[in-house]
Image (cartoon, rainbow, N blue to C red):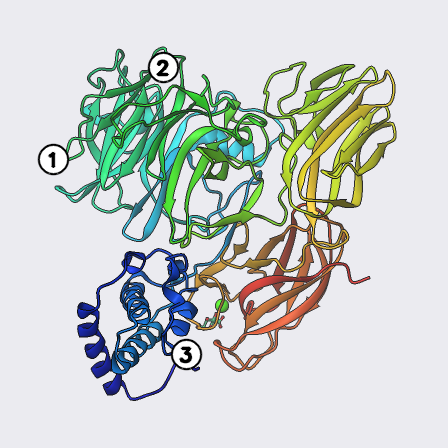
Amino acid sequence: MRRTSRVASKYWTLAAAAVLSVALAVPLSASTTAAEPTQLRDQGAAAEPVVDRGLGFLVSDYQTRHPAKYTADSWRPFAKALTTAAGVADDTSATTSQVAAAKTVLMTAAAELEAADEGTFQTITNNTFWNDTSGNPIYSQGGGVFKFGDTYYWYGVHYVGAESYRANPTQKYDNQVSFVSIPVYSSKDLVNWKFENRVATRSTVIQNGATLGQAGWVGRLGVSYNENTGKYVLAVQAYVGGGHGVLLLQGDSPTDTFDYGYFQTQITNSPTTGTGDQTVFTDDGKDYLIFSNREGRSRGFVAKFRESDSLRIEPGVEIRRGDGREGNAMFKLDGKYYHAASDLHGWNTSVNYVNESTSGNVQGSYSAEFVLPGTEMDYSHVTQTGFFVTVNGTKQNTVIYAGDRWADFAWNGIGYNQWVPITRTGARPQFHSVSQWQFNVTTGEWRVGPANNYILNPDIQADRVIVSSVRGWRNLGGSVTNVNGGVNGSRFALQVSNSGGVEQRIPSVPAGTYTMALHARGSAGQVVITGANGTQRTLSIPSSSGWAKRELTGIELPSGAATVAVRASGSGGVVVDQLSLVKTSDGGEPPAGERYEAETAPAVCQGTIDSNQAGFSGSGFCNGTNAVGAYAQFTVTPTATGTATLGVRFANGTTSARPANLIVNGATVATVSFESTGAWTTWSTKTVTVPLNTGGNTIRLEPTTAAGLPNVDYLDHIAGRSA
Ligand code: GCU
Ligand code: CA
């Protein structure tokens, strides 16, 4: 039987009308009445009638369709037709024409099902400094992401220290919290961020003619859109003119330059002025300030913004009381609210302490505090709670935890923003501490990224102070401590001596082949990795006075837990740092198949990201400035060293070639001639072979003529080592 047909639509319309009246006449059995967009496969025995004259076959065939794959608008009539048809198929007294009409309506509705937007997966890589879509640093501490219309906006604070640390990440910058500006970035996918404006700067005038540049503190902000005034109100934790409070600035658009609205020092019910950290949480179009009291920080509050104009914070409703907490933020997952906060103070890395709502009211009652599962082993991916982004996808709900890595401004590992997914696992939300992941904002789905490091606290940065039991690593005897002086100028390393050891049990790795690597110095030692099936591989560490990289490839691991143990061979100390366990696609080869879009950070485009020439992939392509040297650059992160084949997709609508130097990690390795493709909308792929290191490799295409580059769409990692 054919499922679709090209019969004249007039016939279908008449038949559809016929079955609608049949539908009214046929009593439906209880098992076939559900017309809601839930999966219809399990709705009982309707598909196996005694006499169905071919309709039952059709019904059971269509019952395998899943609502998530189609738009809700097209699913509704289909689900209804399917329910009706199941009833007719079940009804032994249905006439031949009723059966025929039911078939017709069902086939029509099935043909009219529209596929839902499946979205695309974008890669989020932590432990790196993030750039905007123009290749400039994203400066965004203590902020928030808000969706206005169908665009996400990210606001945060640019502090001086963020520039310093980025320029030289081998020291801390304790005193560099002076305020530069509040930038705003926009994105459709929560991964690629376009710089829009500085909504406030040091010269923004606040009350009494003072400026923000004179403020003693500016931080922890969020935005409320007020429907009555049409204004976007930015609520900032501030210390100005001798007072602690919430500074309210407002603008006409999300990216406007914001002006002074009000400075509120006291929120009713809080025992102190100001806030001990705050974020803005939006739920069902209503905005709330989530905060703790400034001194002591022992109480958590949820307060509404004043409905008329959002320029006042209404009395706080206390939702928790106990130990002092800061970095207060709220997320909602599967109908429950979660208040999350960190230990005190100074952007310290911390587990997340969570209180779960016990009613459907964000200002209602909450459970006692518990530690958010998944934040224990590496102090929330070496961060303090920043804010959350709640994404209700077409297939699943995922909350993004946006952590601030900024303690001591900073020197706690590379990168300021560490974002990881939170999903519900069993009764509680689960924090997934991944170093790289891929997120689909449309469906809400996420997956572990190909370069993810499965070892937690791999750089020994979580503790921030010298300890004798290192976070995430269980002592196995001997002497264990973190020591100052990690590899590459990082702050700490792990030292194991007196024949001692530590181990980390990784709860779950997918089956595959892995490479384990670390840097080591000092006396001899070894690292033993044990898979869930008990098989072991050992990486020997010879003694070495300076840092040396050690690597073990081709480690076959079954899915399940894996344990990594670091041991000292004798009484001397072995010092290790930058441990990694990364899945390689096949037998230790780099994970071919990754695509690096030219518009996606950390890619850099010296020109503009355009989308006017059809046929590109992702959200745009790099239209390089027509000049010698105006380059496009990609960062390729394989998991093993070797020669790789890359494909550059480009279009050249002129009649002359546009040659470019291919520069890998600063060294020119080839010249690539990008010939004419005939039109700007005709895209072609050029294959190049390059040597790659593990970690980030910069692949730069630098044009050698005044015409500049062709338009560049993406870089594909086509294959691993060529031989
Ligand atoms: C045209 C074309 C651009 C291209 C440019 C160029 O303007 O629309 O996409 O980049 O030519 O010559 O570089
Ligand atoms: Ca161009």
- From the image, state whether disc 2 or disc 3 is nearer to you: 3
Q: Earlier in the sequence, mark 2 or mark 3?
A: 3
C-alpha span from label 1 to label 2: 29 Å
Answer above or below: position of 355 versus 146.
above
Q: Which residue is the site of mark 3? A: 3
Q: Nearer the viewer, residue 485 or 378?
A: 378
* Residue highlighted by disc 2: 297
303 on left or right of 676? left
Q: Secondary structure at mark 3?
A: loop
Q: CA distance from mark 3 to mark 1?
A: 56 Å
User: Residue 580's quadrant in the figure?
Assistant: top right
The residue at 79%/32% (across/down) is 528
Name the amino acid, label 1. Answer: Ser
Mark 1 touches mark 2? (CB < 8 Å): no
Question: How far separated are the C-alphas under marks 2 and 3?
Answer: 64 Å
The amino acid type of the residue labelled 2 equals Arg
Q: Amino acid at mark 3?
A: Arg
